Image: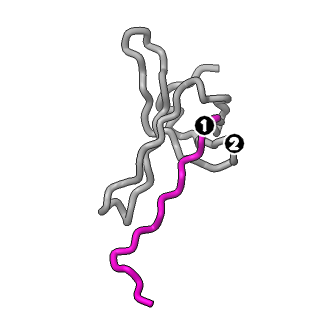
């Protein structure tokens, strides 16, 4: 099976450890000397419509990719930890 980088952008990335959908492939890292694909990158989710930036990107090394299917990519990596919600003002009791 052959797959282009543009085709990978349409595939969902799913973690097989907990079944979480991590997102879609947004970018790839390629070793320019050997031409081998080193990792896939999933951009972090936008915070408040993108006005406050985004969460950290998820970089998955090639060794952690189990299967590249027609619609999904199954990866074996630690799922990203949810961030604590920060409040602008502390609650008074």
Which residue is disc 1 drawn over? 77
In this view of the protein, which residue sits in the foreground, 67 or 88? 88
In this view of the protein, which residue sits in the foreground, 44 or 90? 90
Q: Is residue 18 left or right of residue 53?
A: right
Q: Is residue 7 left or right of residue 33?
A: right
In this view of the protein, which residue sits in the foreground, 68 or 14? 14
Q: What stretch is highlighted in magenta?
A: 75-93
| Residue drawn at 37 percent across, 64 percent down | 49
Which residue is disc 2 drawn over? 17
Q: Say whether residue 28 is magenta.
A: no
- Residue 77 falls in which quadrant of the image? top right
| Residue drawn at 41 percent across, 17 percent down | 31
Q: In which quarter of the image is the C terminus?
A: bottom left
Around disc 1, counting alpha carbons within 10 Å, would you say few (fewer than 14), some (14 to 19), or many (20 or more)? some
Question: Upstream in the sequence, badge 1 or badge 2?
Answer: 2
Around disc 2, counting alpha carbons within 10 Å, would you say few (fewer than 14), some (14 to 19), or many (20 or more)? few
**Percent position of residue 89, x then y:** 34, 79
User: Whole-Å distance between the Cαs marked 1 and 2?
Assistant: 7 Å
The residue tagged with tag 2: helix, strand or loop? loop
The residue tagged with tag 1: helix, strand or loop? loop
Q: In this view, does 73 lie to the left or right of 29?
A: right
């Amino acid at each position: 099976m052959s797959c282009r980088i543009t085709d990978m952008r349409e595939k969902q990335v799913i973690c097989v450890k907990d079944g979480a959908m991590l997102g879609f492939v947004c970018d790839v890292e390629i070793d320019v000397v050997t031409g081998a694909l080193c990792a896939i990158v999933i951009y972090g989710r936008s915070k408040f419509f993108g006005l406050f930036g985004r969460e950290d990107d998820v970089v998955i090394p090639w060794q952690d990719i189990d299967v590249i299917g027609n619609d999904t990519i199954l990866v074996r990596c630690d799922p990203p930890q949810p961030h604590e919600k920060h409040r602008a003002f502390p609650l008074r009791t």
